[in-house]
Image (cartoon, rainbow, N blue to C red):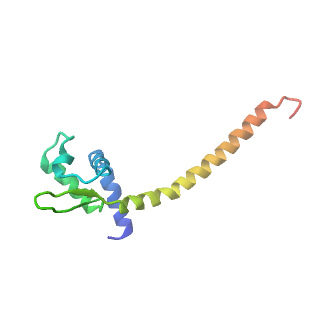
Amino acid sequence: MVTEDRLSATFAALADPTRRAILARLSEGEATVKELSAPFAMSGPAISKHLRVLEQAGLISRGRDAQWRPCRLEAAPLREVAAFAEHYRQFWDSSYARLDAYLQFVQDGIGESEDER
């Protein structure tokens, strides 16, 4: 999958709160489909669809150990999201720095008396 497409698939998978909750649970360690579905009031097939979306986005993988099919979190796509967002964090930081400087300028001007200006 091309990086752009993978990033789009990751964002699409993360757009759903149920899938984000599943990822949060998997951040604590492997879990079975039954364990992952426990907190949700939805059918097994609905949970399976969510897991399929997460798996296609590369956010989870499923193993096989006899009858136990553990799901585990895969962090690589999340690192790509973090790298994508980092560029914008730097933009926000510089924007906030300019705003801080402007506010300090305004505050310094307000503290002066009419004679000092």
Q: Nearer the viewer, residue 40 or 92?
A: 40
Q: Nearer the viewer, residue 106 or 43?
A: 43
Extreme residue in the bottom direction: 2
Which percent across, then down, holds residue 108?
77, 36
Rendered position, 104 above or below 7:
above
Q: Nearer the viewer, residue 75 or 46?
A: 75
| Residue for point 71% across, 39% down | 104
Viewed as shown, does residue 53 lie left or right of 117?
Answer: left
Which percent across, then down, holds residue 56?
25, 62
Q: Quadrant of the C terminus?
A: top right
Instruction: Tell how many labels.
Output: 0
Viewed as shown, does residue 77 lie left or right of 61?
Answer: right
Which percent across, then down, holds residue 53?
24, 57
Which quadrant of the structure image shows residue 111? top right
Which percent across, then down, holds residue 47?
18, 49
| Residue for point 70% across, 43% down | 102
Viewed as shown, does residue 96 lie left or right of 30?
Answer: right
Viewed as shown, does residue 77 lie left or right of 71?
Answer: right
Extreme residue in the front direction: 66
Q: Quadrant of the N terminus?
A: bottom left
Which quadrant of the structure image shows residue 70? bottom left
